[in-house]
Amino acid sequence: MKLKIFILPFFLVMILVLSIGYIKPDFDTIFEKKAEIDTQNTSLKDMDSVLNNISTLNNSLDSNAESEQFMLHYLPYTMNQDQTIDAFGFLASQSGLVVSDMDLKKIDEVANTTIAPDGSIAENAVTNKAKTFQLTGSVLGTYENIKAFYDRLAHISRFQNIQSFSIEKKIETASPQDKGAVSDLKGTFVVAYGYLPKKPVLSALNIPIFLKSELNFSSVALLKEKMTDTPILGKDQVGKPNPFQ
């Protein structure tokens, strides 16, 4: 009789235990799904914010089209070697120099130099790296003219890294009386010019600049103040069409 009294509570406990065993995994799944939904809702809100920021940034670029074009000229998508060759020849001519040598060489990466999403130069940052090509050139002329040329070359409107420059005596005269003329100097320089190829982006959420709603153009204005104006290819040029002539 006493055994029968405990049978019913025992079965009730077993049913409860089994029910909990079956129901708990469902609760775990529900909580996991809820966490996923919360994460997706957060991402959706972030995406809405990013889309609004992109629209605002586009409007900002449209209203600052001149600065945008300047930066695309300063750090273009492609090597645009013609731009630097033309600037070299033009500045040499304007400085009263003769171009004697010119060599171009592509470099795959800029060591330790990267361009951050906001356009600034960062060191060792995990960002889209700029690429470069190297221009090595030589000019002949007087000391003062070569100095003036180097100063102008250092301020052309192109992202660059002047790696070396030198001035040495270059005597190649036909007659003894011309030997040692002050114009017989040779200036040699090596400059790396940068460009930033377009790169596909998997998600705009990973780009810091899209988390902002405005662009800072103050650095562009500062760059413009320090740049040397040189003719654009395709327009009438003041210098010689062929720098070797």
Image: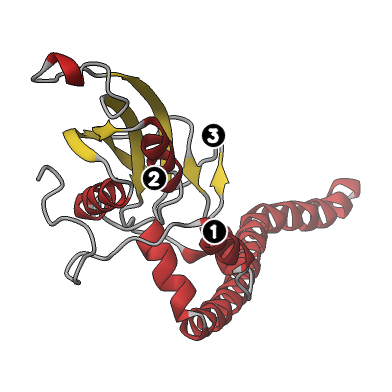
The answer to whether 159 appears left or right of 102 in the picture is right
Q: Report which residue position mark 3 lands on.
A: 124
Image location of residue 150, percent across then percent down: 41, 39
Question: How many numbered circles are shown?
Answer: 3
Q: Amino acid at mark 2?
A: Leu
* Residue 229 figure quarter: bottom left
Q: Nearer the viewer, mark 2 or mark 1?
A: 2
Q: Report the front residue among 198 and 86.
A: 86
- The amino acid type of the residue labelled 3 equals Asn
Q: Earlier in the sequence, mark 2 or mark 1?
A: 2
Give the alpha-carbon distance from disc 3 to disc 1, as whole Å: 23 Å
Q: Give the mark, 2 or 3, whose residue is nearer the N terminus.
A: 3
Classify mark 1: residues with Cα within 10 Å, few (<14), some (14-19) or many (20+).
some
Which mark, residue 49? Answer: none
Q: Residue furthest right?
A: 2
Task: Determine the CA span between mark 2 and mark 1.
Answer: 14 Å
Secondary element at tag 1: helix
Could you tell me if the residues under marks 2 and 1 are in contact, i.e. CB atoms within 8 Å? no
Give the quadrant of residue 191.
Answer: top left
Residue mark closest to the camera, 2 vs 3: 2
Q: For the residue marked with disc 1, what is the amino acid?
A: Leu
Q: What residue did someone put label 1 on?
A: 223
181 lies above or below 131: above
Q: Which mark is residue 153?
A: 2
Graded by Cα atoms within 10 Å as few (under 14), some (14 to 19) or many (20 or more), the crowding at tag 3 reads few
Q: Is residue 129 above or below residue 200?
A: above
Residue 202 or 83: which is nearer the viewer? 83
In percent of width and height, residue 155 lies at 46, 50
